[in-house]
Amino acid sequence: MTAVFYRGVTASYPRAAKSKGMYIFDETGRKYLDMSGGAAVSCVGHQHPRVVESLCQQISSMAFAHTAFFSNAPQEQLAEKLAAKFSDPGAKVYFTSGGSEANETAIKMAWQYWRAKDMPAKKKIISRTHSYHGNTLGTLSISGNLPRRRVMGDLLIDWPRIDPCYAYRYRQAGESRADYALRAANSLEEMIRRHGAETIAAFIAEPVVGASLGVVPAEKGYFRRIREICDKYDILLIADEIMCGTGRTGTFFAHEQEDFLPDIVTLAKGIAGGYQPLAATIARHHIHETFVTTGRGFSHGHTYVGHAGACAAGLAVVNVIDDEKLLDNVRTRGDLLQNELKTAFSDHPHIGDIRGRGLFRGLEIVADKTTKQPFPDEDNITKRLMKATMAHGLICYPGGGSMQDNLGSHILLAPPFILKPDHIAELIDKLRAIFSDVLGG
Ligand SMILES: Cc1ncc(COP(=O)(O)O)c(C=O)c1O
């Protein structure tokens, strides 16, 4: 019996009791290899002593002082560190508690920015199909993920969406990668023209799509062209790096590898590594300045904005990433992980694509590799994969809908940055057994 209103209302879950490094242990002592950091959260590993100590110190000296009345040292230090990593002098950081709040903050910033500039008609946010930006009504409104939207009936705002840059499914036969990148990006220009630039506030996209597609980096040149289009039509560009940021792809920000600078970037999950709920919305100098110089300010806020304990955990996590040079590991172990996955599963009849960047990898599962046709809905591949991974003591992140609606399955891998070759070998053994149980072959 439980009084908990679980996510899955009829589900039962093992109770997590302990964790260390790459592993979580349940109350019965069963061990789970954490190869997705939950959902790309645990980046410095579980129970890192430096993070635990910093958090305990902060909480024992000052756990909470509302940021409508006070600032606090961890918030100041972490903001300074993040702003310094973002290549726009004078950038400012707004801290919230989770990814949805960070994106909701970004949307509201975009709206209020255009109001401050006396262009209140600029309201619509263009996003992409196959996207997930959060679960508040605002962020679900800008998410393209149909199964997640459908449950909300007609409550959501229905704004324009373009297709993502997803070469595995959308690049045409004979089309070069560069031409495809350009075509995919130009669909934004078409959409802006159809609606009128005077009605569009911002465009939002993940530089590397996480849970909606199973780790899909854009083709080279896509985001440079997107930036050009946003500049041409006076539209803010929001990079959702909730999953792919904080070093996950091998650079602190995922957009660094795409050679563009967003106007607003959002971080969550890895930013405090799971030690505390924390998210950040980083705005370029010109956005913050607009609120200051027009005297309009930015009207927003939650009780836990800039929470001292959460920021202390975030500061410790980012310091560990820097001091232990964990991004070197993300790059080298990321390459090793990709090679080992390819060696083990390239010839598997149902693994259609193995892709990603750094320690952010995805395997797309198909019924037929030639036609790329997914398994039918009623086969429930995603749910069965979820069940099988837990049964084999593996935490990874199976997802659905990579083709359309519910159709298409993938597995997302986002292990902690402390991953070692032994863990990769353990992962491959477990995946072999899981694929054999669920897919056969
Ligand atoms: C890309 C992206 N944006 C936003 C969110 C929402 O974050 P949260 O669940 O912390 O609210 C998620 C969560 O999975 C995400 O993957």
Image (cartoon, grey):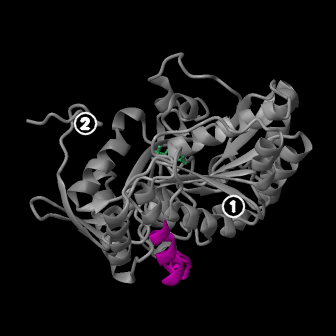
Q: Which residue is mark 2?
A: 6
Q: Are marks 1 and 2 in contact (CB under 8 Å)?
A: no
Q: Which residue is mark 1?
A: 255
SS for dot 2:
loop
Q: What secondary structure predominates along the stretch shown in magenta? A: helix
In the rendered view, would you say 185 is above or below 338?
Answer: above
Residue at the spot 45% in from the left edge and 76% down from the top edge: 340
Specify whether residue 332 is painted magenta: yes
Numbered range of the magenta stretch: 315-336
Q: Position of residue 331 (x, y in %)?
A: 56, 77
- Report the side of 201 relative to 395 (left or right): right
In the rendered view, would you say 282 is above or below 416?
Answer: above
Is any part of residue 412 visible from this angle? no
Amino acid type assigned to the residue bearing label 1 in the image:
His
Amino acid type assigned to the residue bearing label 2 in the image:
Tyr
Alpha-carbon neighbours of circle 1 within 10 Å: few (<14), some, or many (≥20)?
A: many
